[in-house]
Image (cartoon, rainbow, N blue to C red):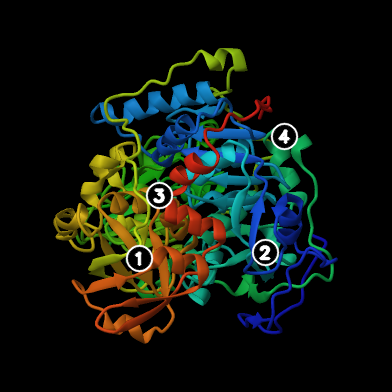
Amino acid sequence: MRRSGPTSGKTGGVITRPGPISGPDTMRQTVAQKLIAAHLVDGTMRVGTPITLKIDQTLTQDATGTLAMLTLEAIGLDRANTEVSVQYVDHNLLQIDNLNADDHLFLESACRRFGIWYSRPGNGISHVVHMQRFGKPGKSLLGSDSHTPAAGALGMLAIGAGGLDVALAMSGEPFPTTMPAIFGVRLVGELPGWVNAKDVILEMLRRHGVSGGVGRIIEYHGPGLRCLAAMDRHVIANMGAELGATTTVFPSDEETRRFLEAEGRAEDWHEIAADADCKYDREDEIDLSKLEPLIATPSSPGNIVKVRDVEGKEIYQAYIGSSANPGWRDFAIAAEIVRGKTIPSKVSFDINPTSRQLLEALIADGRLGILVSAGARIHQTGCNGCIGMGQAPAVGQNSLRTTPRNFPGRSGTEEDSVFLCSPETAAASALFGRITDPRSLGMPYPRLAHPDSTVVSTALLAPPPSLDEARSVELIKGPNIRSLPNFDPLPDTLAVPILLKMGDDVSTDEILPAGAKVLPYRSNIQKIDDFSFERIDPTYLERARAVRGTTGHAVVAGRNYGQGSSREHAAIAPRNLGLRIVLAKGFARIHRQNLINYGVLPLVFADLADYDRLDKDDILHARDLRRTLESAKDITLDCNGPISTRHDLTTKQIKVILAGGLINWRRAHEGAVTAPSVPQRSA
Ligand code: MIC
């Protein structure tokens, strides 16, 4: 590793520089700045200013992909205009009726029609398969999944977004965003035995909380990188989403080369290193050798304690898998821990292989057999219980998972008790039936080197057909696949009741849940409406419907509103129920953009004290809204007195909201798009 940045001087200390420094004229650049500079279409690289980025690759998964494909149809796209676009089917895998299977067939036909790779059900989780088969250092990737930044592990600029933004990127449009600050995290030392890359990101969450990355790219550097394999870096980059970061990047170094060589893609490697004396906007340092096993307690990835602090609590489930611990070593180490032993009968030991390649590798090296003999339940390759698609725990029982999120009810069980930890902690706890620090196992730490070559499996990965063939493909639409509703423009005067007053860090899982009951309606907005805010207030739906055709409504929230998933349904469904304004102390990036894309006005309190003055069922008045939005950043609303708010919208975002959303705006300004066809590159 060539570069190391300025140190903070003491472990855990954070240095914040006074002013923005990221600029195109900065000669000495960080990896993130180099990646942005290489993809900058419009704007200057000054922190907080609008920029647009050229997108080389896109990733969609089935739960968000159906809407993205319907958008491609609506805008009349002929063929994906990217270097590589891949549609994965990894979320909606349970087929208890026709709904999910209908979506799979629709997506398969859309891939053939629009020139997109199709990763079939059973091939694996998008982030992992993408890294294995398509990821390339130096490329940009936009994905309709908040964990897309996982590909930053390979030195990519990988960003999560709503399906509509990803569809437009597929049509060849640059992606609009805000220039993030670069948060350099210097890693020194080496991970001790029994401490996983998961503990590194849990340590970041312990230090910085679930909004510590908002408006930032987190860039890891320093000598400690040497002990992190590419899939370990994936763990850290993946869960940068839990810090609210725009993305996470790692340099492309010798380890990246080793990974790509093992995947049979040595030619895709090139080095990307930060310049020796580059500067970060903010800095932190982690001494890996001082880390110990950590765990997120229910119900936020930000509730971090030492495993030792909760040791002894009985568990019902230990679950290994998901994009937050996807690597071969994550499963192999679990196998070594349980080798020759038996999991107690009261524990459900769930193994969710993350990709077909990984499954084949675990079969080939015998470790799947070891897990099965110990009592593991082997589930199909995919996201599964991470998104509540099966494997829900019993009520009130502790479930230990290596997954990235434990937001309330996300597991599928309303009163769940989900902890997030490393595979080492999950496997050790499975053996004892109670939360166990893996260092108390009393066995030597099995140091497992990644093999030099991996099983490469492409049996379930279909390349796009030729343009001629594609043009004759009909989209296959089952009865559950419905067009997007039409939304009206923003009125000039609003008198909207506040239907909900929420606190800080409300996740999209609470706004519009996922899970096996709801996910099948991701392609049917009219139906998915029914679940809006049901976890926060089950009376919301009825109250929203009552005023939908007349006034519409508003909701009020605290900081970091809409953290978590990229699902645009969390904006569309409440919008379809009449949501006009979200007034919050602050927003998570992707959800804010999704609100804008569907014509909902996101406003922030200019004076936080006003939050306390508002109550559920108060009426919020806005007058002369259209003109004020265009002419000023400050908007004064009225609710028993003035409420000062700000919007921070770009000129285009204002126009989009005034038009009632991005689709309306495009219809009015650009008409249908027929993108030039570009031959797809093979993986
Ligand atoms: C998640 O982890 O919440 C998901 C499921 O991957 C989501 C996508 C979705 O809701 O479909 C995400 O992270 O964007």
Instruction: Tell me which numbered mark, 2 or 1, is placed earlier along the sequence.
Output: 2
- Looking at the rendered structure, the kind of residue marked 4 is Arg
Residue 115 marker? none
The answer to which of 635 and 195 lies nearer the viewer is 635
- Looking at the rendered structure, the kind of residue marked 3 is Arg
Residue 582 marker? 1
Instruction: Tell me which numbered mark, 1 or 4, is placed earlier along the sequence.
Output: 4
Task: Work out how far the residue at label 3 is from the one at label 2, CA to CA, in angstroms.
Answer: 27 Å
Residue beneath label 3, please? 567
- Looking at the rendered structure, the kind of residue marked 1 is Val
Q: Which of labels 1 and 3 is toward the front?
A: 1
- Secondary structure found at label 2: strand
Against 129, residue 445 (above or below) is below
Residue 374 position within the rendered picture, expressed as x and y whole percent measured from the top left: 37, 43
Residue beneath label 2, please? 220
The answer to which of 434 and 160 lies nearer the viewer is 160
Picture quadrant of residue 273: bottom right
Residue beneath label 4, please? 265
